[in-house]
Image: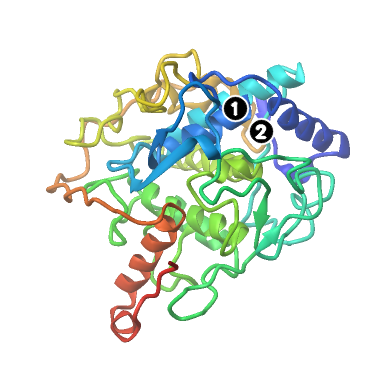
Amino acid sequence: MITRRNQNSFSSSDRAEFVRALKALKNVPSHFNPPTVSRYDDFVYVHMQAMLLMEIVDRTKPVQNENLKVTGDMRMPMWAHRCPAFFPWHRVLLYQLEQELQKAATNPSLAIPYWDWSVDQSKTSAPWTDDFMGGDGKDGPVTSGPFAGAANWKITLSEDSLDHLVRGFGLATDERTKKLIAPNLPTPSNVSACLQVAVYDMAPWNDSSKLVSFRNEVEGWYVPPGNATPIGMHNLVHLWVGGNNGTMLPSTSPNDPVFFLHHANVDRLWAIWQARNPGVSPYLPTSPLPKDPGQAWDEPMIFYDESLSSTPPWAAPPATPLDVADHHKLGYAYDHEAPFTLAEELKPTTTEAPKVDLLKQRPLKILPKEHFLKRLEELASEQNPNEAKRQTPKRKK
């Protein structure tokens, strides 16, 4: 059993080892066919495939920016976002990366640390130190730390074709109102509120701003009344780090290593929620959703597009949400958990949330890098309909 620790408890040697493992993975061959440039880039590619439709230009060459054509369409239905599988899908992504980092570091005890962004909110202290994740770029290139510049951390798959990290702490701006939309990170009260939501997910199982479920609130599509911003939890962190042009804006956000510290904390919240709600099904739905594959409790989740690779991203069979609902069975625990003993097997309850007609899947044809911000603008308009009528949204050409 390995322990995922809070990154603020890391010693200088802990930080150095984790950075070395990440960089070593950039020199491990890809598992895809056609391959990406490195094993680390495989994980960026998996996340990218989960969000966008793409075509490979020349299948005899490595998959990278100049050899990948993004059609401009979002993948609908999605595999890992705006849907119930958000938590278990990302849990698998982190678990598989953790296995690869252990091999690269020749340390079977190495674990991904988590960044508790509700507590550690300084722009200049951990994790943003020069010996760990590096610092801000103020809506431009990161200039400090081990991942600054293409010479230290070359990006080969990105929606904007940039080859280096870009960050803009707290600078994300609404194009219509010119106001900051993510000036702050989620607070302890935001975390406390989401942990009190008593159902994992429910129909219509999507990103509706009116869908009150644990998954939808943590992912950031449902924002409780009175919240300081129209953007919630997980989404807010991506925007706070990324700013207006940053690497942390989907779909290639795993290019920024802090992505995995962020999602380790998201994964930790699911574990805490389960522990605080022992009588509640840890995952829903239990039955397949029409037109939404890979979402039911016992359905294999989807991690790659067979039209883009003849081989899967990892050797293990596609996991179901049931397979990974109990993180202890994957061999890790969080540092705040009591000494671990095997608990009773997690099982879904027999009663699901009330079923309603699923919303029709909507085709979206937009510039790839803008799809995330576009959806956030839609949610802001839903919450402030009068302001939306007064404003004419402007999109970048």
**Contact? badges 2 and 1 (CB < 8 Å):** yes
Question: Can you identify the residue that label 2 sits on?
Answer: 112
Q: Position of residue 381 (x, y in %)?
A: 33, 73
Question: Can you identify the residue that label 1 sits on?
Answer: 97
Q: Is residue 115 left or right of residue 24?
A: left
Q: 296 above or below 259?
A: above
- Foreground residue among 27 and 373: 27
Residue type at numbered disc 1: Leu
- The residues bearing labels 2 and 1 have C-alpha atoms spaced at a distance of 9 Å
On the rendered image, what quadrant is the N terminus found in?
top right
Q: Please report whichever mark, 2 or 1, sits nearer to the chain's N-terminal start.
A: 1
- Foreground residue among 364 and 67: 67
Assign a secondary structure to mark 1. Answer: helix
Quarter holding residue 385: bottom left
Residue neighbourhood size for the residue with mark 1, other residues' Cα within 10 Å, grouped as few (<14), some (14–19), many (≥20):
many
Look at 73% across and 43% down and name the residue there: 7
Residue 223 visible to an observer of this rendering: no
> How many numbered discs sit on the rendered protein?
2
